Image: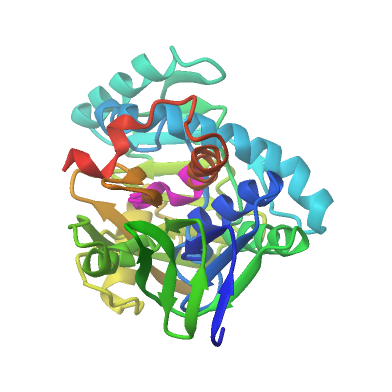
Amino acid sequence: MAGTSSTDVCIAGGGIVGLCCAYFLAKSGVVVTIIERDSIGSHASGFAYGSLSPLGEAGLAEDILPELIIAKMGMEIHTRFAKELPLETGVDIQHRFRPAMDLAFNTLDEAKCKSQVEWRKREKGFHAEWIDGDSARELVPSLSPKIIGAAYTEGVADVDPYRLVLALTQACEAMGVIIQHGDVIGLNEADGQLAGIRTTRGELSCNTVVIALGPWTGSASQWLGLPIPIRPLKGQIVRLNSPLTPVNCSVGWEGNYACTKPDGLLWAGTTEEDAGFDESPTSEGRDEILVSLRKMIPALDEAELVHQTACLRPLSQDGRIILGRIPQRENVIIATGTGRKGILLGPAMGKLVSELVTDGYTETNIEPFRLNRF
């Protein structure tokens, strides 16, 4: 982008959140430009696990409930995406419903699992129950004989993140969304009003700016003049060729997970590392994942490591999303802080941003997620 151009809305960031913002805005007839420093979905959005579990897998109620309304909205939209995006783009995003089990190895694990079941089973559209170890191994025969039971949940799903990003990109471009490479380095203001943005490749006039830079959102603090408490949380995933140990539902323990995906590979993760902006896969991360995986599924001697990825997830200071207008700047909206739930929450955040731009408000109360809470 050389010189100056114009658009209705400029979105800084081409990950799952930015793409979903663009998708819903374009559906409403808004002219949108995405500014992406690298390639679309080349960071966390393209390398995530893709779990769609509004009630959380291996998660406690206090971790999930603050964002539950956003998570359930995300789940609804994903279910629509499963029908609409393949028709719009021809891309199979490999969305599928499958059960999940949070595993218990001891009485402490059991108490946590039963606590999860108690609140999950009250949520409409889901089925949750405690099952014993033998019942768990009937579902996944390769599970450890040391497992004494599991919190079993139906109504959850997963999707292939890379295919989802590809489909959203194609759908956006078909609706006229412009995707340009560059880095947003500042705002242009005239008479105290937003006039546009400055990028490393030129200037862009716009009426609204959406900041969806993921773990790099903190860089906007410099040109917004206010702190944005976001840090990168590194996570690694391995994919194994393990045809003798199929895992036909998602299994989890202490924040780790494993599932055989439609590509036939056993996906397992994840680490939580404070490693700055280092996105390199490491042998230490691989070994940490495999130790946890072998605790859940011991018989992996014939498994072959096919792929290992690492990505950075945006984690806010209090662990909750940041969503809404920037204080004192009505035409600047921030959407970030999804942590490990970016694929699930991204579509809902995109829809809410679209409502803010087109209607001026959202029917869903997003006040608890605004930046001014810090």
Expressed as whole percent of the image width and height from the top left, the position of residue 361 reads 47, 31
| Quarter of the image where the C terminus is located | top left
Question: For residue 210, what is the image quadrant?
Answer: bottom left
Is residue 213 found left or right of 105 in the rendered image? right
Q: Give the range drawn in magenta.
A: 336-345
Is residue 334 found left or right of 54 in the rendered image? left
Asked whether the viewer can see residue 127, the reply is: yes
- Whether residue 340 appears in magenta in the rendering, the answer is yes
Question: For residue 115, what is the image quadrant?
Answer: top left
Question: For residue 266, what is the image quadrant?
Answer: bottom right
Expressed as whole percent of the image width and height from the top left, the position of residue 16 reads 52, 56
- Whether residue 259 appears in magenta in the rendering, the answer is no
Asked whether the viewer can see residue 148, the reply is: no
Q: Residue at x 43, y 79 (%)?
A: 199
Q: Which residue is drawn at 52% across and 43% down?
A: 357
Front residue of this view, candidates 8 and 213: 8
Q: In the rendered view, tell whether residue 84 sits above or below residue 282.
A: above
Expressed as whole percent of the image width and height from the top left, the position of residue 140 reads 53, 40
